[in-house]
Image (tube, rainbow, N blue to C red):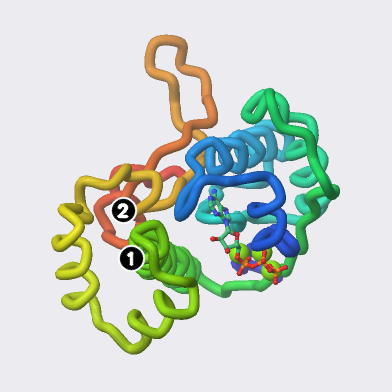
Amino acid sequence: MLSTWIVVRVDGCHFHRFCEDNGFQKPNDEQALKLMNSCAVSLLEMFKDIIFAYGMSDEYSEIVSAVVSLFSSMYVMKWKEFFPEKEFKEPPYFDGQSVCYPSSEILRDYLAWRQVDCHINNQYNTCFWLLVKSGKSRTEAQSSLKGTQTQAKNELLAKFGIDYNALPIIFRMGSSVFRDRDEPTGNDRVVVEHCNIIETSFWKEHPRILD
Ligand code: ATP
Ligand code: MG
Ligand code: MG
Ligand code: MG
């Protein structure tokens, strides 16, 4: 439909199990995130209609279809590059849902929602895995975090000597993939950045993305 953005959200199927089977580090396996980012870069390189992608955990939000299939096959092709010592126990696959957002503002609200979710999940998972690694069972960890607000979680992190804002930015912000001008050559290239896409400043600094 005219002036409507199509967002395709790709999400790993049963990745809870897939991560365990393949021994991903908890709460965040940086190699696995970089494999996801590398797949998204390939998609932007191959499908010129995709103008922006945002990813966190096992999901990626992208624009235009045929995306899920290419994402899955890139994931398999690139696996060895990121995990040279690991073999799959089961084939990784992704589901995709596409939603239309009828203005740039609403599209930005959607992306902001995903980035807030990235932060909320990361904060929870960081606390959860600290408790589990310190000897609590998963059930105990879950029930002691149930209903806690940000402040209580920050206090828990402080007790373990962790400054949330010092954690790797890829875990806190997720990853944004887009085309940017390479100044020396004047060519477009696909870049991966871990930036705040909730604030308007990012969109003002990159006016070409949603033009
Ligand atoms: P579904 O098939 O319904 O999507 P799922 O098991 O994939 O089920 P999600 O809600 O998509 O469930 O959650 C993804 C799971 O994969 C979470 O448990 C998340 O912690 C884990 N995961 C994804 N990427 C990573 C990563 N890079 N490092 C560690 N864990 C990860
Ligand atoms: Mg899913
Ligand atoms: Mg999933
Ligand atoms: Mg997911």
Q: CA distance from mark 2 to mark 1?
A: 22 Å
Mark 2 or 1 closer to N-term? 1
Tag of residue 127: 1
- Which residue is nearer to you in this view: 142 or 176? 142
Q: Can residue 30 be seen?
A: yes
Q: Callout 1: 10 Å neighbours few (<14), some, many (20+)? A: many
The answer to whether residue 50 is above or below residue 149 is: above
Place of residue 33 in the rendered image (x, y in percent of width and height, measured from the top left): 54, 43
Left or right of 186 on screen, residue 24: right
Cβ of disc 2 within 8 Å of ligand 1? no
Q: Position of residue 195 (x, y in %)?
A: 33, 47
* Above-or-below relation of 81 to 147: above
Which numbered tag is attached to residue 89? none
Q: Secondary structure at mark 2?
A: loop
Pick the front one: 117 or 187: 117
Residue 19 in the image, given as x and y percentages of width and height: 64, 52
Indicate the position of residue 180 as horizontal and vertical percent values.
Answer: 45, 31
Q: Which quadrant would the N terminus be assigned to in this image?
A: bottom right
Which amino acid is tagged 1?
Cys
Q: Which mark is residue 196?
A: 2
Q: As drawn, which residue projects farthest toward the bottom?
A: 147
Ligand 4 quadrant in view: bottom right
Identify which residue is drawn at 64% across, 38% down: 44
- Image quadrant where residue 193 sits: top left
Identify the residue shown where x is 43% and y is 51%: 174
Left or right side of 38 for 201: left
* Element class at badge 1: helix
Q: Residue furthest front?
A: 135
Q: Left or right: 53 with respect to 196? A: right
